[in-house]
Amino acid sequence: MIKIAHISTVHRREDIRIFEKECCSLATANYQVNLIVADGKGDETKNNVSIYDIGKFNGRFRRLLHSASRAYIKALELNCDIYHCHDPELLPCCLKLKRRNKHIIFDSHEDIYANINEKHYIPAFIKPLVSFILSIYQSYVLKRIDGVISVTPHICQRLKKYNKNTVMVTNYPIIKSANIPKQSTNRTLVFAGGITYQWRHDILLDALSFCEGVTYNLCGSAYEDCLEMLKQHKNWNKVNFFGVLPKNKVEELMSKSSIGIAILMYGKNVGGKNGTLGNTKLFEYMEASLPFICTDFVLWKEIVQKYECGICVNPLDVQGIAKAIQYLIDNPQIAKEMGENGRKAVEKEYNWQSQERILLDFYNKICGLMDKSEATTPS
């Protein structure tokens, strides 16, 4: 049995992409799957995945200094055939493991170069230098490992310049139930996810000034300064803020809402106005049979126009957002049909099962490289 290890010192052990999708799919396909995390919750085995905790470090810089080295030590201890790394700070770990003749995959969840420019804790004057150095180092590492995975076309196209064995595995949802969720007809919007500056909750609140009797169900982890800024908004009294909720409570909240919101700002990390398939927001609403209002990214517009499941808007157009909200509220039958169309779309096309096949084929290719290297290694 091929022994593999996924490594992340940043993401939660229950991370949907890493654990629920990739690790569990590989375990079902009879790989011996290990997951190395750094959350301080201890070791456990779940869904035939062995989870190893290297301990949690408080503070961003302590984590950067110590977690990667501990992850490398645990990786050596496990002595796996394939290592699948998920964080930019693990690039040195990729290189060191490769030098020990291990087979290495790097999974780029986002555009590393562009993401630096959106890190609020990095001083603006050094961001260009940090981005340049990290980009050069990333290209150096990726040229020397066995394969690369990413989530959306514009990132894959760039990474293929460094490693031809690059594939796209998107974040489409796992369709676990054949039961189609019921759609609410109240005047309630919903967002579940990151409460950050990139998600323009402030613009959405501005739009609520033009929508009578509409409330906003908001939940998720928040940047403290962003949340405080929103709380000072004149329309904060129209927000029901729930903080971080478990997945079943998020699903329950969506079932009690009538319109999903995905107003994401244009930015380098999402390919400018092209957009990204790496973000799960649209597909979560489609799975929940919710019509939605989203940014008019090229990639998102293609989905919306193909299946007639939502409305695309400029993320800075307050009046346009308000009109989209009012239209769906005033036309409940059209909103219902949009929600049904979205559900049909994820069942037919935008689901994890389609991406699972790509992942397993990719691993088969890596295993083929292993066979070749063993055949050419002197006994």
Image (spheres, rainbow, N blue to C red):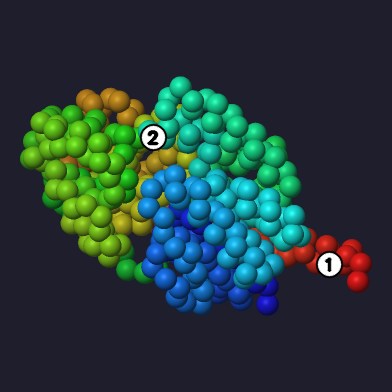
User: Which numbered disc covers residue 374?
Assistant: 1
Residue at 63% in and 61% down: 83
- Left or right, 48 with respect to 167, comes to left
Q: How many marks?
A: 2
Residue at 54% in and 31% down: 131
- Visible residue check, residue 168: no
What secondary structure is marked by label 2?
A: loop
Between the C-alphas of marks 1 and 2, the distance is 46 Å
**Residue type marked 2:** Tyr
Task: Give neighbour class at mark 1: few <14, some 14-19, many 20+ (Cα, 10 Å).
Answer: few
Nearest the eye: 202 or 83? 83
Q: Pick the quarter of the image with the C terminus.
A: bottom right
Q: Earlier in the sequence, mark 1 or mark 2?
A: 2
Q: Position of residue 190 (x, y in %)?
A: 23, 48
What secondary structure is marked by label 1?
A: helix
- Left or right, 137 with respect to 23, comes to right
- Visible residue check, residue 236: yes
- Residue placed furthest toward the right: 378
Q: Position of residue 118 (x, y in %)?
A: 42, 33
**Residue type marked 1:** Glu
Q: Nearer the viewer, mark 1 or mark 2?
A: 2
- Residue placed furthest toward the top: 125
Residue at 72% in and 43% down: 143
Query: Above or below — where is 335 with respect to 76?
Result: above
Q: Position of residue 5 (x, y in %)?
A: 59, 65
Query: Above or below — where is 260 with respect to 184?
Result: above
Q: Pick the quarter of the image with the N terminus.
A: bottom right
Nearest the eye: 165 or 127? 127
> Pointer 2: what residue?
121
Residue at 57% in and 55% down: 69
